[in-house]
């Protein structure tokens, strides 16, 4: 009877220790995975922005007919087209 009781106590202790170690390793691996995914997302956002984060606006293409129309409408002086933004 004493052998069975010792065996059960040792088996319970070993399984408890094993479960705690497993939880620790799974949490650390999950944290590494989340950190890696966040880094990939951050790099993708930077790549999508084109590496520019200085607040400047770059226009890659202005249609030719729009340029011709704008040059005919505005006579003399500089005109800045703006849109009012309410806070």
Image (cartoon, grey):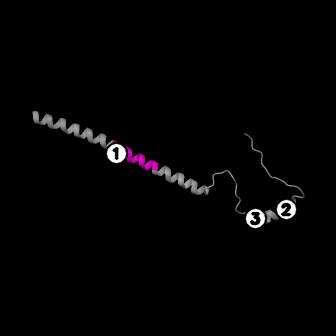
For numbered disc 1, what is the local secondary structure?
Answer: helix
Residue named by callout 1: 25
Q: Residue at x 79, y 50 (%)?
A: 82
Checking the image for residue 71, the label placed there is: 2
**Cα gap from disc 1 to disc 3, whole angstroms:** 58 Å
**Predominant SS along the magenta part:** helix
Q: Earlier in the sequence, mark 1 or mark 2?
A: 1
Q: Position of residue 77 (x, y in %)?
A: 88, 55
For numbered disc 2, what is the local secondary structure?
Answer: helix
Q: Residue at x 75, y 44 (%)?
A: 85
Q: Nearer the viewer, residue 32 or 9?
A: 32
Q: Is residue 80 above or below residue 12?
A: below
Checking the image for residue 63, the label placed there is: 3
What is the crowding at mark 1: few (fewer than 14 residues within 10 Å), some, or many (at least 20)? few
Within the magenta stretch, is there residue 36? no
Left or right, 58 with reference to 45: right
What is the crowding at mark 2: few (fewer than 14 residues within 10 Å), some, or many (at least 20)? few
Left or right, 66 with reference to 47: right
**Cα gap from disc 3 to disc 2, whole angstroms:** 13 Å
Q: Position of residue 81 (x, y in %)?
A: 80, 52
Residue 2 image-quadrant placement: top left
**Cα gap from disc 1 to disc 2, whole angstroms:** 67 Å
Q: Earlier in the sequence, mark 3 or mark 2?
A: 3
Q: Is residue 56 above or below residue 63?
A: above
Q: Is residue 5 above or below residue 36?
A: above
Q: Is residue 73 above or below residue 8?
A: below
Q: Position of residue 78 (x, y in %)?
A: 85, 55
The span picked out in magenta is: 24-35
């Amino acid at each position: 009877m004493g052998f069975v009781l010792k065996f059960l106590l040792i088996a319970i202790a070993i399984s408890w220790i094993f479960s705690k170690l497993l939880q620790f390793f799974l949490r650390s691996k999950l944290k590494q995975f989340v950190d890696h995914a966040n880094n990939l997302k951050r790099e993708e956002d930077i790549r999508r922005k084109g590496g520019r984060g200085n607040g400047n606006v770059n226009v890659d293409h202005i249609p030719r007919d729009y340029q011709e129309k704008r040059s005919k409408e505005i006579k003399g002086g500089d005109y800045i087209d703006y849109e009012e933004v309410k806070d």
